[in-house]
Image (spheres, helix red, strand yellow):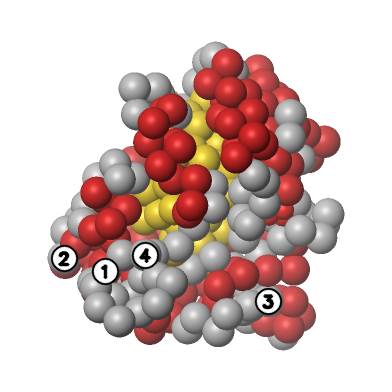
């Protein structure tokens, strides 16, 4: 990879003023070797379309419907996202898997809808604390990956982006150890290249879970960490600080 992908998941935070301020910050952050991608609440996607279409900052939706269209109140379809020039979408974030009960089958449907509309999915995977404590972390993560592989026959994306986010590390201030991140990222990359037609150079594995300026350096130096999916620290100037730290090491 020739750049580090820093993706900010703003979750259900902010208002129009703050969204514009956060967009200003990434637009001003001309940091070498950093690729920015932001995921605002869906109501602000049109603001991103207006402000970022001509820029190098990418944006995406935090979720997409598993359905194409119809009577699904509150849902947003992949074709609607594409219609708004939105090219990326988070799929299977922990807060949807574990907070809203989305299982691997639903997530595979969402992944399929995204590929049908040529959106770039960022598939989020990660084990729970119980799975970790029972030594099932790798099995859980590879199972989550395997569930979307059949979708790759729909249209193979140019790259497959996976965010490894241990559930117990999200929003807790506790990040996974560099050795755990190293072995999981290697397993993810190996599994994808052995089970699909994706080449190693087409696979990007991001780490997510309590990434902040104070831990960005050791984490980005881990082999096969191609960037970060940042939650809390993407809502303030820590996001660009993380970019500066990563860029200085590149
Ligand atoms: P966090 O969230 O950085 O606040 O832990 C990461 C995420 O949910 O993607």
Mark with earlier residue (4, 2): 4
Residue 76 is labelled as: 4
Disc 4 to disc 3: CB gap under 8 Å:
no
Q: Would you name the residue on which mark 1 appears?
A: 112
Disc 1 to disc 2: CB gap under 8 Å:
yes
Residue 126, compared with residue 57, is above or below; it is below
Of badges 1 and 4, the one in the foreground is 4
**Residue at 28% across, 76% down:** 67
Question: Which SS class for mark 1?
Answer: helix
Mark with earlier residue (3, 2): 3
Residue 128 is labelled as: 3
Disc 4 to disc 2: CB gap under 8 Å:
no
Please say whether residue 221 is visible from this viewpoint.
no
Q: Is residue 38 left or right of residue 118?
A: right
Cα–Cα gap, marks 1 and 4: 15 Å
Residue 224: % across, % down: 52, 44
Disc 3 to disc 1: CB gap under 8 Å:
no
Residue 40: % across, % down: 54, 47
Cα–Cα gap, marks 3 and 2: 30 Å
**Residue at 34% across, 22% down:** 54
Disc 3 to disc 2: CB gap under 8 Å:
no
Residue 144, compared with residue 57, is above or below; it is below
Q: Is mark 1 within 8 Å of ligand 1?
A: no
Image quadrant holding the C terminus, namely top right
**Residue at 39% across, 22% down:** 55
Mark with earlier residue (3, 1): 1
Q: Is residue 206 left or right of residue 118?
A: right
Residue 201: % across, % down: 34, 41
Q: Would you name the residue on which mark 2 appears?
A: 154
């Amino acid at each position: 990879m020739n750049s580090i992908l820093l993706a900010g998941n703003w979750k259900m935070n902010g208002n129009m003023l703050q969204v514009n301020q956060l967009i200003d910050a990434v637009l001003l952050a001309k940091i070498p070797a950093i690729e920015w991608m932001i995921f605002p609440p869906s109501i602000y996607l049109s603001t991103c379309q207006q402000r970022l279409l001509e820029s190098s900052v990418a944006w995406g939706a935090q979720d997409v419907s598993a359905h194409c269209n119809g009577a699904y109140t509150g849902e947003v379809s992949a074709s609607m996202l594409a219609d708004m020039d939105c090219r990326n979408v988070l799929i299977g974030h922990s807060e949807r898997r574990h907070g809203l009960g989305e299982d691997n089958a639903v997530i595979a449907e969402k992944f399929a809808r995204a590929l049908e509309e040529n959106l770039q999915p960022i598939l989020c995977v990660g084990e729970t604390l119980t799975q970790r404590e029972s030594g099932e972390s790798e099995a859980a993560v590879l199972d989550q990956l395997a569930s979307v592989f059949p979708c790759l026959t729909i249209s193979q994306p140019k790259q497959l982006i996976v965010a490894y986010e241990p559930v117990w590390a999200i929003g807790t201030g506790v990040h996974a150890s560099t050795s755990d991140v190293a072995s999981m990222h290697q397993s993810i990359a190996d599994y994808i290249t052995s089970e699909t037609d994706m080449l190693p150079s087409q696979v990007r594995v991001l780490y997510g879970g309590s990434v902040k300026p104070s831990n960005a350096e050791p984490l980005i130096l881990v082999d096969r960490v191609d960037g970060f999916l940042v939650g809390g620290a993407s809502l303030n100037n820590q996001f660009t600080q993380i970019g500066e730290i990563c860029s200085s090491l590149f």
